[in-house]
Amino acid sequence: MEILFTYEIWLRLSAFLGLLAIFLSWEGLAPKRSRERSRGSRWLSNSGIIIIDSIALRLVFPTAAIGAALWASETQFGVLHYLGAAFGMPLWLQIVVAVLILDFAIWLQHLIFHHVPILWRLHRMHHTDVDVDVTTAVRFHPIEMLLSMAIKIGVVLLIGAPAAAVLIFEVLLNGTAMFNHSNIRISRKADQILRLFVVTPDMHRVHHSWHKHETNSNFGFNLPWWDRLFGTYRHQPQEGHQNMVTGLHEFREAATNRLTSLLIQPFINANTSNPKQDKQANLPREQDSASEE
């Protein structure tokens, strides 16, 4: 466990950088959609956000969720530790159950952040990206990241999640979030198979539609089952993947997507929708093919 704690950040960083390189290359070779805005300005803002998030998390939660899991293990605190001691629940099963519970907790948190106005103010920054690609996966306001970590630590302590389960979950969550935000082309047949087990780019892109009923669907980042189970699953966007508009009506100007503007975005009121911008944004893009490939 001490080795796991010591090298946790390097394991996560290696997985993150490796997968980031893969998905960036994939986006360059086989993009799903054309871009509305240049990569440079967006990537600069999104990269700045992840750096600020990482610093904030390490300052406020130095040991993060892994540290909480190690403390729970040392003190035998939490439901899974009790089940292990009282009924001989094996460690491998504790890990599987913990990963499932953590994934459901993140799904539920995501749904709540959409429906509670003050929390939506924090979360909407993620949705103001007018183009969805792998960098959108790290575009979360620092305050939301701190709240999310506090919730995660609470769940880890409550269930007594093994440290290995927390590390597995964190790597899976980061990897699948980058995957399903990536602007990559996957055949319709492959997508239909994959989305039985994991949230795919086509499935999650619906969630980034500027139509509210589509934004409030497909909340999963990792496992797709919760949306199907609780009735928030939407198979495809009503306008097709090529014609749909991603982002929000109120924050489409380049100025509102600069780093400084993103940081103060939760504290300002959204602009009213601009009819001229709406008309321009609704101009048809290249029509989806019948196979959605």
Image (cartoon, grey):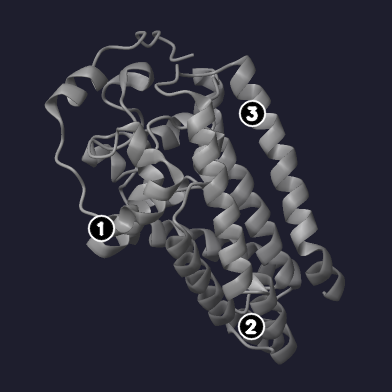
Identify the image quadrant of residue 36.
Answer: top left
Please determine whether, in this image, residue 198 is positioned above or below residue 162.
above
The residue at the point 55 percent across, 58 percent down is: 53
- State the SS at label 3: helix
Please determine whether, in this image, residue 253 is positioned above or below residue 169.
above
Earlier sequence position, callout 1 versus callout 2: 2
Q: Which residue is mark 1?
A: 115
Q: Amino acid at mark 1?
A: His
Please determine whether, in this image, residue 274 is positioned above or below residue 155.
above
Q: Which residue is mark 2?
A: 83
Residue 63, position as x, y percentages in the image:
68, 74
Front-lying residue, 81 or 115: 115
Estimate the spatial distance between the alpha carbons at disc 3 and disc 2, rounded to whole Å: 43 Å
- State the SS at label 1: helix
Can you see residue 177? no
Q: Amino acid at mark 2?
A: Leu
| Label number found at residue 24 | 3
